[in-house]
Amino acid sequence: MHDVAIKGGTVVSPEQGVFDADIGIGGELITTVSTAGDIDGDRVIDATGRHVFPGVIDPHTHFGLFRPLADDADTESRSGLVGGVTTTGNIFRRGKSYPDIMDDFFAKAEPNYRHDYFFTLGLLSHDHATEIDAVIDEFGITSFKWYMNYKLQAAERFGVEQNLLDDVADHFISELAEIDEPTTLAYHAENAEITAHLTEQLQDAGRDGYDAIVERFPGYAEAQSLVAGASHTRQHGYDDDFYAVHVSAKETAEELARLQSMGYGVTGETCTHYLCLTSEECDDRMKINPPIRSQADQDALWEHLAGGTLSIVGTDHIANKRANKIGEDIWESMWGSPSTATMFPLVLSEGFHEDRLGLRRVAAVTSTNAAKAYDLYPKKGSLRPGTDADIVVADIEETKTVTPELLQSSADYTMYTGREVTGWPTQTLVRGRIAYENGEVTAPPGHGTHIDRPIAAGDERDG
């Protein structure tokens, strides 16, 4: 007898395929995946007519950016459970010493997350480069971020000794390359010199619509920066651990494909807003860096996601209130939008139902590949016996209209309000606990926990 039995569903596994099976859960782990149909449990979930996916992983969120981390950990993990999210990566940056401040971040996060999480820390200085070993050993954090958008701003913005120029980057890349444990370096591709010049020109011209943001961050500047960053890591033999976040432009995806064809091990992530919106539809709610672009960019991103150049979908989730988010014009409006809860449903709706992705690919790009890239696999991102029972039972034919109320975030707006989206979770399980069921979040704050790494060998990365 299992603690929980999921019976009658169709399992979707990137590794094993799509097949009818029952899943048994004991404690926090999957104990059985059986095609015989003879398992039972203290609690039975009838998944007849539904599909069973590995728990969704959103590797790209910013909890605690505009609201206290404790508050975001509670409300935004609650929202994520509605959309099948069982683990998120929280990316943040501070100029201070990370060993000095991380205990405080854990004290705010651990009692409040409802699903599991991991941290990714921005590297801003030479001091941060020297702290990498300590961060891994003391806190189980093995992923870091290189913010090219702060290249010319780091000293003033974060109080570090100098701007984030290539000597700083060279320092932390060389430190990462020497570490035995598997690590990940996320990279915000942006040519800050180009965007700074364009910003001045556009503001002088009085441009204040969404198109000004698109022109401020041109696709070619993103693409050029990606190639430069990838080449820099390759000089240290570290390109297999180089992770390009939020690829938004056709040019960038094409350059990524070229790099991969030359043997670079670069991983590419895109976000749901680039796959599901175009700039013509956008207003200040969608002010994001990089911006949402054209239909041609969207089409190219879907093609590269299906073909494997891009292997992961994230969201860049930032929660805010509309009154704070929307300014007098596009320049005054704040960055970021909430979107974790819509990630998996949108990939089903716009990917699977529009014949762009098969179900196995949906599971790979929303779970398994992120687990591999961030060294969470096979603990996360798998439906194998012995792995964490992070599971989504979904009705892939159910259509819902997106509203803020549906998503249960602290945000009172979405980028997708009024949109009909087909494919939604009916149950979300986090380490064996039914955390969301039929509209109700049942996991309390504190059920989630930090996932200490490393937990897997670096050669698990593929997909």
Image (cartoon, rainbow, N blue to C red):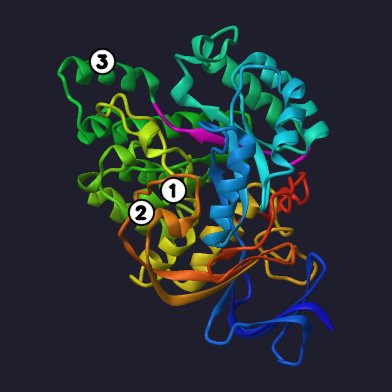
* Residue 270: assigned label: 1
Instruction: Determine the residue located farthest toward the left in the rendered image.
Output: 205
| Span of residues in magenta | 180-190
The quadrant in which the N terminus is found is: bottom right
**Disc nearest the viewer among 3 and 1:** 3
Give me the residue at 55% from left, 8% from top.
Answer: 162
Sequence-earlier tag: 3 or 1:
3
Q: What residue does disc 3 label? A: 200
Q: Is 332 one of the magenta-colored residues?
A: no
Q: Residue at x 25, y 40 (%)?
A: 283
Tell me the residue at 49%/76% (across/down): 395
Q: Which residue is mark 2?
A: 275
Mark 1–mark 2 Cα distance, whole angstroms, equals: 8 Å
| Residue 289 visible in the displayed image | no
Asked if disc 1 and disc 2 are in contact, CB closer than 8 Å, the reply is yes
Residue 314 is left or right of residue 278, and the answer is right
Q: Which numbered tag is attached to residue 246?
A: none
Q: Badge 1, how many Cα within 10 Å: few under 14, some, many 20+?
A: many
Task: Give the total number of marks visible in the rendering.
Answer: 3
The residue located at (49%, 72%) in the rendering is 359
Residue 126 position in % (x across, y down) = 65, 14
The three-letter amino acid code for the residue at tag 1 is Thr
Callout 3 amino acid: Glu
